[in-house]
Image (tube, rainbow, N blue to C red):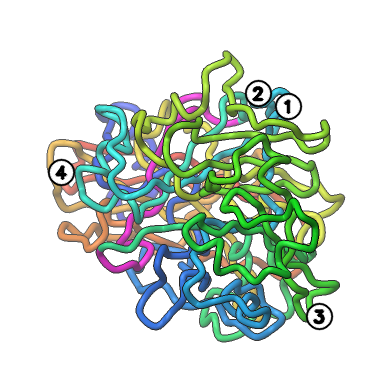
C-alpha cells in the first residue's frame, strides 16, 4: 500500500529500520523552540541593557522584539526609568520569583515523585566547555554567549535516556540576536502562554504563568552599582552599594504601578563579600529558595541558599550523589554562568488548572517513552493563546539518516489519554534539504477546543520521519501535553 495513503506503514517499518541520530548543530531538549524573554548585555541598537526582548514560539529566526512596555507590564527598563535608573545601569539577571528550585535544605537536588525539573542557563562569551560536551560543540560555532542550554534534573519522572543531559535549547540565530550579542538574563515563565501572535497586546482572556506574580528580582553589576540611586539601597549604614545585593520591584496588582526598587537580600545575607558580583539569578519566592552564580570562577557557578532555613552562606547545588551540578553539566572549569532559570513542569502546584494554578506543566510538553524503542529525533510542544484561541504548537527537529541529508517526509499523529490509537494530524511534510535552521524543524499548530482548553485532558503528539529511499526511519520522542 502506498505510504501516502497509510500513515501506519511508517510505524510498522520502524521496527526493522536502523536508528537515526541527531546532528551536532540542532537545538534539542524540552525547551527547544520555546518562547522566552532575554536581556542582552549592553542592550541592542536603541535599547538599554534592562530592556526585555522576546522570542516567540518556534524556529523562525525572526529578530527578538521588545516586550510591550506600558506601566503595567514587567519590562525592567521601563520600570527602572520611572525611579531614576540610569540608562547605563548594567543589569546582570532577572527573576519573577517563579523559578522552581527543586533542592533540599542542604542544596541537594530533590525532585518530588512524578515530577520533573530542569535548569536553563547561558554562559559568558569565551566559555569552552568540557571536551566532547554539547557546550564545547557550541563554543566551536563561535556564539556561545548568545545560546541557551537546558539540563534535566536527575530524579525526574522523565525518559531515563534524557535525564542529566545538557542540550542547547536556543541558538543565537533562533533567538533572533545579532552576532556578538550576549544573553545576560533569561526568563521562560514570562512568555509561556501569552499571546505570541503579534505581541502588540497582552491577551486579556488567558493569563500568563506570571499572572499572579507581582515582583521582579534583579541584580546590577559591580561596575555600575555606583549608578544606583541611593534610595534604592535604603537608609541604614549597612546598605552600601554592591553587585552582590539582590534588588526587587513590586506592585500591588497587575494593573497597579510598580513601586520603587529596594533591596531583597544584602551580600552579607548570602555569605558573600561586598566586592562580589551576582550574575545569574533564580528566585523561588514560594519556597524561599535562591540559585545564583557569581562573576568569575572563584566560586561554584550554581550556588544555592534555602532562605526558609534562615539562609546563611550559599552552598554549591549538588546532584543526589554529591557531585556539584556545575561539574556535571559539561561546562569547563573557567566557564562563567551568565543567566539562570529553573523550571518545575508540574501541574496544579498552586491548587488548580491554569491560569491560576499552573506553574509550567500545562504550557510545556513532557517527553515520553517511544512506541518502538529509544527515539532518535527531538520533539517539543508549547501552549500559546492568540486572540482568545488557545493552541499547542509542536515541532519535530532532526531527520534520518545520520550519513547525509537526503529527501524525506514526516508525519504527525496524536493519541488521547492512555489510548494508543493513532490519529493523523495535518498533511505529510516534505523535508527541506537546505534548511535555514539546522535539523529543518517541522511544526504543527493544534487548536484546543475551548471546552477542553484548561481541563487537563492528556494528549500526546507523535512525530515520525523517513528518507525517500525508505531505508532510514525514525520516531521522535512523543510529547505529552495537558489541554
Q: Which x, y percent locates residue 265?
A: 73, 49
Measured Cα–Cα span from mark 3 to mark 2: 38 Å
* Badge count: 4
**Which residue is rendered at x = 73% and y = 29% of the image?**
112
Residue under circle 3? Answer: 256
Measured Cα–Cα span from mark 1 to mark 3: 35 Å
Q: Does dot 1 land on a helix, a strand or a loop?
A: loop
Say whether disc 1 or disc 4 marks the residue closer to the N-terminus: 1
Relative placement, left or right, of 412 versus 258 is left
Q: Which x, y percent locates residue 248?
A: 71, 61
**Looking at the image, is mark 1 or mark 4 nearer the viewer?**
1
Question: Magenta segment, which residues?
Answer: 158-179
Residue under circle 4? Answer: 469
Name which quarter of the figure residue 193 lies in.
bottom right
Relative placement, left or right, of 408 versus 43 is left
Say whether disc 3 or disc 2 marks the residue closer to the N-terminus: 2
Residue under circle 2? Answer: 108
Name which quarter of the figure residue 287 lies in.
top right
The reply to whether callout 2 and callout 1 are in contact (CB within 8 Å) is yes
Residue under circle 1? Answer: 104
Which one is in front, 470 or 54? 54
Amino acid at each position: 500500500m502506498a505510504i501516502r495513503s497509510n500513515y501506519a506503514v511508517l510505524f510498522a517499518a520502524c521496527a526493522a529500520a536502523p536508528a537515526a541520530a541527531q546532528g551536532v548543530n540542532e537545538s534539542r531538549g524540552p525547551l527547544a523552540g520555546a518562547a522566552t524573554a532575554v536581556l542582552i548585555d549592553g542592550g541592542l541598537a536603541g535599547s538599554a541593557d534592562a530592556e526585555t526582548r522576546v522570542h516567540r514560539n518556534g524556529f523562525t529566526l525572526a529578530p527578538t522584539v521588545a516586550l510591550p512596555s506600558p506601566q503595567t507590564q514587567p519590562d525592567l527598563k521601563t520600570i527602572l526609568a520611572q525611579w531614576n535608573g540610569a540608562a547605563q545601569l548594567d543589569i546582570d539577571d532577572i527573576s519573577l520569583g517563579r523559578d522552581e528550585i527543586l533542592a533540599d535544605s542542604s542544596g541537594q537536588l530533590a525532585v518530588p515523585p512524578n515530577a520533573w525539573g530542569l535548569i536553563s542557563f547561558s554562559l559568558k562569551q569565551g566559555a569552552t566547555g568540557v571536551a566532547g560536551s554539547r557546550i564545547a560543540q557550541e563554543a566551536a560555532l563561535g556564539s556561545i554567549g548568545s545560546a541557551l542550554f537546558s539540563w534535566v534534573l536527575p530524579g525526574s519522572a522523565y525518559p531515563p535516556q534524557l535525564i542529566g543531559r545538557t542540550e542547547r535549547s536556543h541558538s543565537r540565530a533562533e533567538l533572533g540576536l545579532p552576532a556578538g550579542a550576549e544573553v545576560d538574563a533569561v526568563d521562560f515563565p514570562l512568555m509561556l502562554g501569552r499571546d505570541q501572535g503579534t505581541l502588540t497586546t497582552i491577551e486579556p482572556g488567558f493569563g500568563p504563568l506570571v499572572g499572579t506574580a507581582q515582583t521582579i528580582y534583579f541584580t546590577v553589576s559591580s561596575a555600575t552599582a555606583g549608578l544606583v540611586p541611593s534610595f534604592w539601597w535604603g537608609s541604614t549604614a549597612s546598605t552600601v552599594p554592591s553587585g552582590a545585593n539582590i534588588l526587587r520591584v513590586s506592585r500591588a496588582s497587575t494593573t497597579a504601578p510598580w513601586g520603587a526598587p529596594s533591596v531583597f537580600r544584602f551580600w552579607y545575607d548570602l555569605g558573600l563579600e561586598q566586592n562580589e558580583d551576582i550574575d545569574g539569578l533564580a528566585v523561588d519566592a514560594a519556597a524561599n529558595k535562591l540559585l545564583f552564580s557569581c562573576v568569575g570562577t572563584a566560586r561554584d557557578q550554581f550556588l544555592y541558599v534555602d532562605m526558609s532555613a534562615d539562609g546563611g552562606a550559599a552552598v554549591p547545588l549538588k546532584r543526589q550523589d554529591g557531585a556539584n551540578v556545575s561539574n556535571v553539566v559539561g561546562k569547563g572549569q573557567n566557564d562563567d554562568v551568565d543567566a539562570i532559570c529553573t523550571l518545575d513542569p508540574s501541574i496544579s502546584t498552586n491548587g488548580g488548572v491554569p491560569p491560576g494554578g499552573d506553574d509550567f506543566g500545562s504550557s510545556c510538553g513532557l517527553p515520553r517513552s517511544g512506541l518502538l524503542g529509544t527515539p532518535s529525533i527531538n520533539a517539543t510542544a508549547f501552549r500559546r493563546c492568540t486572540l482568545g484561541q488557545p493552541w499547542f504548537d509542536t515541532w519535530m527537529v532532526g531527520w534520518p539518516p545520520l550519513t547525509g541529508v537526503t529527501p524525506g517526509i514526516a508525519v504527525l499523529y496524536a493519541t488521547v489519554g492512555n489510548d494508543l490509537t493513532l490519529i493523523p494530524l495535518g498533511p505529510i511534510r516534505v523535508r527541506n534539504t537546505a534548511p535555514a535552521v539546522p535539523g529543518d524543524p517541522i511544526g504543527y499548530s493544534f487548536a484546543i477546543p475551548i471546552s477542553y482548553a484548561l481541563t487537563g485532558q492528556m494528549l500526546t503528539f507523535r512525530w515520525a520521519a523517513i528518507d525517500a529511499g525508505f531505508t532510514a526511519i525514525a520516531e521522535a520522542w512523543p510529547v505529552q501535553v495537558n489541554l
